[in-house]
Amino acid sequence: ELINFPPIVLPPDVRQALMAPRAETSLPESTPNPSLRHLDPDHDALSHHSHDSPSSHYFSSNGPGFNRLRLRVPMERRSVRSRSSFASGSRKIANRPPPVHLRRYYADTEAVINWPPQVQDYNKRFTKMLESIKSRHDPTVTTVAQGVLEWKRMQNAKNIGLDIQAWLDRFYMSRIGIRFLIGQHVALNTQQAHEDYVGIICTKANVHDIVHEAIENARFVCEEHYAMFRGPPVQLICPPNLTFPYVPGHLSHICFELLKNSLRAVVERFGLGDDDMGIDAPYPPIKVVVVEGKEDITIKISDEGGGISRSAIPLIWTYMYTTMEGQGIDQDFQASDFKAPMAGFGYGLPLSRLYARYFGGDLRLISMEGYGTDVYIHLNRLSSSREPLL
């Protein structure tokens, strides 16, 4: 659809204005993450160029990342052949005119005073097509999960292999990235402007409110699934005004899935109480602690649901692994909080870890068999990591 989408026809004056070369010879300056400079082994070797070369920001865009790679936008890599050529010819590159691809990606639109109507029409049609593509692929997770489940039954395999696990990780990480880009474009073109939002990115995402909403949703699903009057209590310890730039939907999904696991573990360990009397069992509270650090915002979810055996720890990160038996996948399942099954999908932990890692965070689990489990959600608040799209 994207390949065959009819291209826009611009008037000659507008096309000429967009193709005109820009005056700048480098990309906009970015601020590296100072706390991660020690991770870049070449920082000291290249630091003397940052003061005497006007093109230094062109090669240091986005600062060093957690994986020891210098983070640059893709356009830069087409001009940079090697670091040795940069060290020997930085002054020559600084005096060169900007490459054609930079002129195309960073077009000067100040000369265009009035955009022609066909631009607005093209953007509306393109946005509508993206919405249709995104909606059509909503059930992809369920469809692939059903395929993996059928493959396991055919092969009589208890767990999937490492090669399939790695492929699914790459597939779902790519899906998260594509849907994020589509959602961002659609939101920028369809939603009303808001001072705290840029598309689907909230510049002041309130962690307390997002986690609290996930707690309410998870408890609702738990009470509905077990036909309980009141589910296990959840204590939230979080600064009420803690905000940082993030995608609220990603954080809500992660917390919701982890809280479902904790609620189910607690209910199954302590029972349902007296059904005839309508009295629920005295459940120990699930504790959610949110702490802000210099590099990360960490969310710890602790339960007393009995924990996980040490031999099962490596399996919890594999797709289609679940401790709940007899739970099938509904063909009409949609990834919404109130329609989600309590457990048995086998995708909660692996997908939550991918969502956390997409923006440079991580998900860790520590379990004490016979007592309970602690899950740590690390959210990178410094924007120092590139998206793991490979």
Image: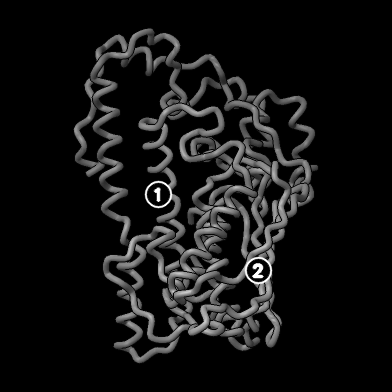
Q: How is the image coloured?
A: one colour
Please determine whether, in this image, residue 45 is positioned above or below residue 252.
above
Q: CA distance from mark 1 to mark 2?
A: 27 Å
- Depth check, mark 1 against mark 2: the one in front is 2
The residue pinned by badge 2 equals 375
The residue pinned by badge 1 equals 178
Q: Quadrant of residue 285?
A: bottom right
| Label whose residue precedes the other's in the sequence (1 or 2) | 1
SS for dot 2: strand
Q: Nearer the viewer, residue 107 or 252?
A: 252
Q: Quadrant of residue 47?
A: top right
Q: Nearer the viewer, residue 55 or 146?
A: 146
Dot 1 alpha-carbon crowd within 10 angstroms: few under 14, some 14 to 19, many 20 or more: some
- State the residue at coordinates (62%, 24%): 94
- State the residue at coordinates (70%, 83%): 371
SS for dot 1: helix
Q: Quadrant of residue 192?
A: top left
Horizontal side of residue 172 vs 10, given as left or right: right
